[in-house]
Amino acid sequence: MNTSTRSLLLEINSLQTWFDTRAGTVKAVDGVDLTLARGEILGLVGESGSGKSVMGYSIMRLIDLPGRIVGGSIKFYGEGTQNEDLVNATSDRMRRLRGSHIAMIFQDPMMSLNPVLRIDTQMIEAIQAHAKVSNKVARDRARDMLGKVGIPSPEERLQAYPHQFSGGMRQRVAIATAMLNKPELIIADEPTTALDVTVQAQILYEVRKLCRESGTALIWITHDIALISGLADRIAVMYAGRVVETGLVRDVIAAPRHPYTAGLMGSVPSNNPRGKPLRQIPGMTPSLSNLPKGCAFAPRCERATVTCQQVPQESPVGAEHKVRCFHPIESIPAQSRHDRIKV
Amino acid sequence: MVVVVFISMYALGDPTEVLIAPDASQEVRDKLKQELCLDRPLHEQFFYCFVGNVLHGNLGISFVHDVSATQLIFDRLPATLELAICALLLAIFIGIPLGMLAGLKPQSPIGKGIMTGSVLGFSLPTFWVGLMLILLFAVTLKWLPAGGRGETVQILGMQFSFLTRDGLIHLLLPAVNLALFKIALVIRLSRAGTMEVVHQDYIKFARAKGLSTPRIVFLHMLKNILIPIITVLGIEFGSLIAFSVVTETVFRWPGIGSLLIQSIAKLDRPVVVAYLLLVVFMFILINLVVDVVYSILDPRVRLGGRS
Ligand SMILES: Nc1ncnc2c1ncn2[C@@H]1O[C@H](COP(=O)(O)OP(=O)(O)OP(=O)(O)O)[C@@H](O)[C@H]1O
Ligand code: SF4
Ligand SMILES: [Mg+2]
């Protein structure tokens, strides 16, 4: 899967989304560049608070006050759309795009379906918001989609209310709803984090399959770098509102170049020697309203030097592999890499 | 409760003092007392006369009007019900939209203005607002009548004002007056509900589906905030009926509220007791209705829902 050989779907340039709070301006997303090809699956990884959800909401233009997009552009090259910049699109235009061209799934399946409306109501309205379709036809489409995401006896389940489903089933309903209009892009914000591991694996597998079949591009947001390796084509690692490393999954996983990515990899249990305490990245996630000057990772980075008081720019370290670091880790085999990371 | 009322009405004084001319002979007095069962000690009055009658479905004869207390109350009830329902509708159809608007735009001048209005609605005394309404619309502007029920229409043996133009005009001011406090309450409730619901994931998901704002507001949000509002309004409807006393007095509205005031003044015990029993019965009935409406609105409380 190569960005250059496929046509571009999404192109984000120096996007900035800030929140004006009483404690100061929180720069949740601060200069993110990201591209996505049609049908590509991108894993967006980072610690809690690194700005992943805000990224997703920014693309959907679902940022509410006190948040606002203060700069940058989000070019969307959708089918039948004219290279529009979502940052400047009117709210009516965005409403038309949402759910039909770009869909989103949220983290908590217990909360993302309206508790007082039946499943059929919530699915049919998603179709009818974008096309003049009779109730009967819309209902049939909803039922078929429920079947596709693995819900047994979908015809009866259409008449149920959300509280009659388990968490995993609710998330399937949400996924089916997101896929109803065959969007070109789905943003999935940690949709399996709240579910248990077996359900998580099933859903992951099904979503991947459905996206591949329909050629839908997917941005899968997660803090679990191990999960991404089996799912995505490409990976983008976020730290404190910036993408610090992007590349093809196999390149990044095999040889992470940014010290933060290496730290994330090092803390995956299966990458740790048995019987020893789990490695973790020293220090805490920084407060976004009070970031250190220069590289935000510097206080936690063992490679930091005085140069790191400047902001590192994104620089290529391989084919499609970019990193934002003055002293990237040299390409070395995975085994010896572990020895470098402090326990 | 009945016992408490019984005793306190007894303690208030002797109704015969009020009912009979001061120069009446002792003989007349005794005869009346005997008729009204007032010649016996209190406990006998209660057990022998009152409970005995109630068991025969009779709440007693009004000391003053000489008709059965039940009859008296049911003659007056439609007027109060009409007023209370009208006030309730005003509270719902004015309070909910304003409250939701204030909840959607809490920082805007409109949102803040609505909240200021609701503070006034809460804090101004009902009787004073009633008098001001009369002063403005009836006395100064002469648009609306100052009191009374106006023309009525008889349905199923009961008189109603809301079906005639004249009746409606008479109904308007007292209904607004009675509704004012409830409108303020509903504004508060729907604003708080809206501000909570608006941040829920399911609203964000509804927006992510590309639904129009009216659909999100009037279906997804409204149906969720209605649940607590219906509960509170149910309880409040009881109090609308029970305590429409002030408004009915100010606007000379011939309902059970003004009947109660007159009866207390004249120590007409059977009417007061019958009134209280009716109010208790109403509260029970309303609770039942609220439970039913609640289960229609909220699928989670429906029986046998889980599969
Ligand atoms: N409504 C808001 N008001 C103020 N700050 C906000 C708001 N929403 C998000 N933020 C800030 O933006 C930052 C990034 O939040 P975001 O939700 O994107 O993190 P995340 O990477 O998705 O984390 P998680 O893994 O916990 O979901 C956080 O530091 C948060 O404080
Ligand atoms: S720029 Fe410097 S501080 Fe930042 S990650 Fe690279 S080495 Fe560490
Ligand atoms: Mg998040």
Image (spheres, grey):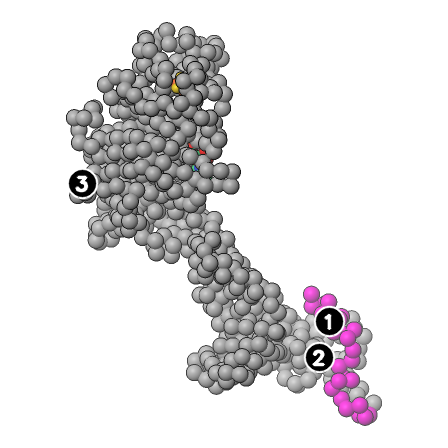
- At label 2, the amino acid type is Ala
Name the residue that disc number 3 marks.
Answer: A79
Q: From the viewer's perspective, tell me whether residue A138 is left or right of residue A69.
A: left
Q: Which residues are magenta?
A: B1-25
Quarter of image, res B10: bottom right
Quick one: SS at disc 3?
A: loop
Query: For mark 2, what is the residue?
Result: B265
- Farthest right residue? B26
Query: What amino acid is at disc 1?
Result: Phe
Camera-side residue of B2 and A145: A145
> Of callouts 1 and 2, which one flags the residue occurring earlier in the amino acid sequence?
1
Q: CA distance from mark 2 to mark 3?
A: 80 Å
Residue B169: x and y in percent read: 47, 81
Instruction: Classify residue B28 by image quadrant.
Output: bottom right
Residue A19 to residue B154: above or below? above
Q: Is residue A238 above or below residue A135?
A: above
The label on residue B126 is none
Determine the residue positioned at 75% across, 85% down: B18
Q: Nearer the viewer, residue A164 or A200?
A: A200
Q: Main secondary structure of the magenta part?
A: helix
Quadrant position of the C terminus of chain B in the picture: top left
Asked whether mark 3 and ligand 3 are closer than 8 Å, the reply comes as: no
Label 1 chain ID: B
Q: Secondary structure at mark 1?
A: helix
Give the label, 3 or 1, closer to the camera.
3
Task: Give the number of the mark in front: 2 or 3.
Answer: 3
| Secondary structure category for the residue under label 2 | helix
- Percent across and percent down for residue B219 are 37, 55
Mark 1 or mark 2, whichever is nearer to me: 2
